[in-house]
């Protein structure tokens, strides 16, 4: 007689677990360590950081400075993240987020601070873009610039693609 209620309990537990909210990496503290993690289940170890320099974009009648950052792993995998600020407003000391719904603060009318991201490794046939998944989230916390470098921390995750990166890096400014 007790086996049916137990079976219903176990079934309801598994349904609730399956419906649990995905991990939201746009919230909480970023681990204080060098950037590392995994993409598509494979280890990611940061090899280099680059960015497009002196790039601006006009959207909705506002000019934005574009911070397109390329975090390249030692295996050639690249996480490309684009953040924007109103022209002349530095990202220093600020945290930019994109939650699991792709929402975050606006840099200007209709223009989110995080414009998008992509993961690519042509040699491994990996290509994942922000518009293809519904469980991605990220935060980038910029520190204060020192000379021609801007320290930052990132927490990025896409559970459906077995991707999570977290930790610190330094972005070159020149």
Image (tube, helix red, strand yellow):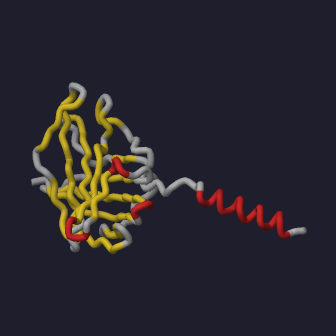
Q: Is residue 80 above or below residue 48?
A: above
Q: In the rendered view of the protein, which quadrant contains the N terminus?
A: bottom right
In this rendering, the answer to whether 144 lies above or below 31 is: above
| Relative image position of residue 73 (x, y in whole percent) | 23, 69
Q: Residue at x 37, y 53 (%)?
A: 138
Picture residue at 77% right of the left edge, 62% below the top? 8
Q: Quadrant of residue 43?
A: bottom left
When asked about the image quadrant of residue 165, the answer is bottom left
Residue extending furthest toward the top: 61
Percent coordinates x, y for residue 30 in the rendering: 40, 60
Using residue 169 as the reference point, say whether residue 162 is left or right of it. right
Quadrant where the C terminus is found in the figure: bottom left
At 27% from the left and 54% from the top, the residue drawn is 118
From the top left corner, tell me how far across and down residue 101 is, in percent. 44, 44
Q: Nearer the viewer, residue 121 or 53?
A: 121
Q: Residue at x 42, y 47 (%)?
A: 99
Dividing the picture into quadrants, the one containing residue 54 is: top left
Percent of width and height locating residue 11:
71, 62
């Amino acid at each position: 007689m007790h086996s049916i209620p137990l079976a219903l309990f176990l079934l309801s537990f598994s349904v609730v677990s399956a419906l649990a909210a995905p991990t939201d990496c746009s919230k909480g503290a970023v681990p204080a360590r060098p950037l590392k993690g995994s993409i598509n289940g494979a280890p990611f170890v940061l090899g280099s950081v680059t960015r497009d320099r002196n790039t601006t974009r006009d959207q909705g009648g506002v000019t934005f400075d574009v911070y397109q950052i390329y975090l390249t792993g030692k295996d050639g995998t690249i996480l490309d993240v684009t953040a924007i600020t109103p022209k002349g407003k530095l990202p220093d000391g600020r945290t930019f987020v994109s939650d699991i719904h792709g929402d975050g603060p606006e840099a200007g009318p209709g223009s989110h601070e995080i414009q998008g991201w992509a993961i690519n490794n042509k040699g491994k046939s990996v290509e994942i873009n922000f518009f293809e998944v519904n469980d991605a989230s990220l935060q980038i916390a910029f520190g204060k610039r020192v000379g021609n470098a801007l320290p930052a921390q990132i927490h990025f995750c896409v559970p459906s693609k077995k991707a999570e990166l977290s930790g610190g890096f330094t972005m070159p400014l020149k």
